[in-house]
Image (spheres, rainbow, N blue to C red):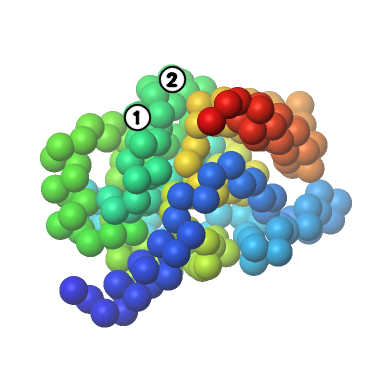
Amino acid sequence: MRPAAVAGLVAMAAIAGLAGYWMSARQPAPEAVPPSAAARQVPAELPDFTLADAAGQPRSIREWSGKSLIINFWATWCPPCRRELPLLNRLHADHADEGFQVIGVAVDFREDVLAFMQETPIDYPMLIGEQDGLDAARALGMENLGFPFTVFTDRRGRVVTVHVGELHAPQAEAILSAVASVDAGRLNLEAARNEIERALAAFRAERQQKPS
């Protein structure tokens, strides 16, 4: 085992599976949104990072410039991460024609990810990294939060929102609808984030009202 990488993974796993939490990305005025205290500093724009894909080839996240990105950070040892993979496959299939691109970032040991992918269909590009995967997460301000988390950007590469915890279909569709409105010029970032916050708050309230 790799001590530095394992220590980082354990730290990230401490609160893995935190569900239903939403935070806004920090933006300069006039579209400023105060970051959550837990969020640290989510950058206004998606930072560049390069990781090896499943074939071992280095891939820069900039290769998908011009698309609205759904970047899912996960690990094979994380149950909520595994549960949301079928949803991510559906998002990839259903929204690619609308200009959305799903990308997985597995912050895990490469051999474990490749073995997992032999058994579990994943239809979208997968980037894999241990320490460099953690570095990419930290570049997004996510040093002390757990997996999974999903970054949503608009076509200009601006971070619209980061969803921490397992992603569910109603949450994903609400976020993608708001991002599409930003891309079409119907909403600015602040309005889109407010719309997302209202939708996710309604989703949380609905789940809380359901009997356990």
Q: Quadrant of residue 37?
A: bottom right
Q: Tell me: residue 176, above or below residue 8.
A: above
Disc 2 marks a residue whose amino acid type is Asp
Between 10 and 67, the one lying in front of the other is 10
Judged by depth in the image, the label closer to the viewer, 1 or 2, is 1
Q: Is residue 201 visible?
A: yes
User: Which comes sooner in the sequence, label 1 or label 2?
Assistant: 1
How many numbered circles are shown? 2
| Whole-percent x, y for residue 153 in the image | 57, 43
Q: Which residue is label 2 attached to?
A: 94
Indicate left or right for 185 with 171 as reference: right
CA separation, marks 1 and 2?
Answer: 12 Å
> Which residue shows up at 64% across the image and 46% down it?
22
Q: Tell me: residue 101, above or below residue 49.
A: above
Query: Farthest right residue?
Result: 30
Q: Tell me: residue 125, above or below residue 202.
A: below
> Which residue shows up at 26% across the image and 79% down it?
3
Between 36 and 183, the one lying in front of the other is 36
Indicate left or right for 156 with 71 as reference: right
- Under tag 1, what secondary structure? helix
> Which residue shows up at 40% across the image and 29% down it?
87
Indicate left or right for 201 with 136 as reference: right
| Whole-percent x, y for residue 26 in the image | 71, 57
- Under tag 2, what secondary structure? helix
Q: CB under 8 Å between callouts 1 and 2? A: no
Q: Quadrant of residue 51?
A: bottom left
Which mark identifies residue 31? none
Disc 1 marks a residue whose amino acid type is Pro
Query: Farthest bottom residue?
Result: 3
Q: Which residue is label 1 attached to?
A: 86
Q: Residues within 10 Å of mark 1 (few under 14, many from 20)?
A: some
| Whole-percent x, y for residue 201 in the image | 71, 35
